[in-house]
Image (tube, rainbow, N blue to C red):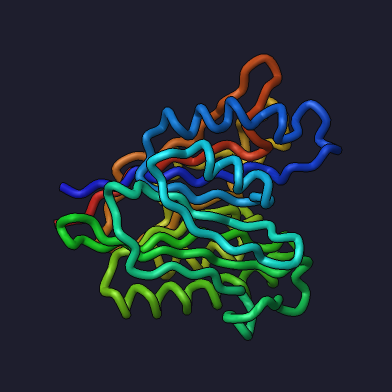
Amino acid sequence: MQKYRILSFNLRVNVASDGKHAWGFRKEQAINFIKQGKFDIIGFQEVTPDMYQELREALHGYDHFGIGRDINQEAIPIFFKKDKYRVIEKKTMWLSDTPTVESKIEGSFFPRIVTYVVLEDEKNQRISYFNTHLDYASDEVCKKQSIILSQIIDKITDLYQAEFILSGDFNVYPDTETIKFLANKYQNIYKQVDRIGLTFHNFSLDTLGLPIDYFFFSKKLKDESFQIVHHEENDFFLSDHYPLIAEFSIKK
């Protein structure tokens, strides 16, 4: 049975104002965590060009793809095992009325994007993986972005007849119109309520609360396992978000 082990991880941009929590102090442990996980596919959010370079150099055995959303080149790159998959298509699109050019919808603080890859394994089994990071302006803005996102997903999955997995930082809680819209169209990793937990902790010890990071996936996929990884050691954090790990199989 084909299985997919996926990591979705908002790494928190590299800014000096984070002090002891800045990327330079976190990166070694964060990269070690990623390596030890033996993931098939990884979706990162909040990756600045210097961070992207360090990830490329450290994650041997992975191919990757990602394009910056604007002049600052913050990206949401995807990494995937190069000995397991070949790329059918890879692309970054903007969640706006003009998805093929750098742009944003009215009300969004930043241009927001989706990066995706269509992968095929040695048995010609295809999977589409979509990685995104929605804006934090409002639920209304996020829903508009999620509608555009769903149109892109539906078009690509129909074109390649491939099951899909979507993950990322959606910046809204489960009871919002954004999440209701997506959960009505696709399977939601939090459909099992005992999985619900805090995913953005802002460099605190909090673990109780609601998520803003999600997995959604197509109807023919089965979520075999899911974990919000509460990694903290002596007030040391991998990021201001907890990593999300999910395993999927294709239903027979």
Residue 73 appears left or right of 157:
right
Horizontal side, residue 74 vs residue 219: left or right: right
Number of dots carrying numbers: 0
Q: Position of residue 218 (x, y in %)?
A: 33, 63
**Quadrant of the drawing holding the C terminus:** bottom left
Vertical placement of 139 versus 95: above or below? above
Query: Where is residue 246, by image quadrant?
Result: top left
20 to the left or right of 181: right
Query: For this rendering, which residue is in front, 97 or 82?
Result: 82
Extreme bottom residue here?
Answer: 97
Report the front residue among 145 and 120.
120
Name the residue: 54% across, 32% down.
31
Identify which residue is drawn at 47% across, 79% down. Answer: 151
Asked where in the image residue 97 lies, by quadrant, the reply is bottom right
83 in relation to 91, above or below: above
**Relative to 201, does residue 174 appear above or below in the rendering?**
below
Foreground: 70 or 163?
Answer: 70
Q: Position of residue 160 (x, y in %)?
A: 29, 75
Q: Position of residue 228 (x, y in %)?
A: 50, 36
Q: Residue at x 68, y 22 (%)?
A: 236
Question: Which residue, as the protein is rendered here, is positioned at the far top?
Answer: 234
Q: Residue furthest right?
A: 17
Viewer-nearest residue: 118 or 201: 118
Which residue appears at 64% of the width and 50% of the height? 47
In this view, 77 is above or below 158: above
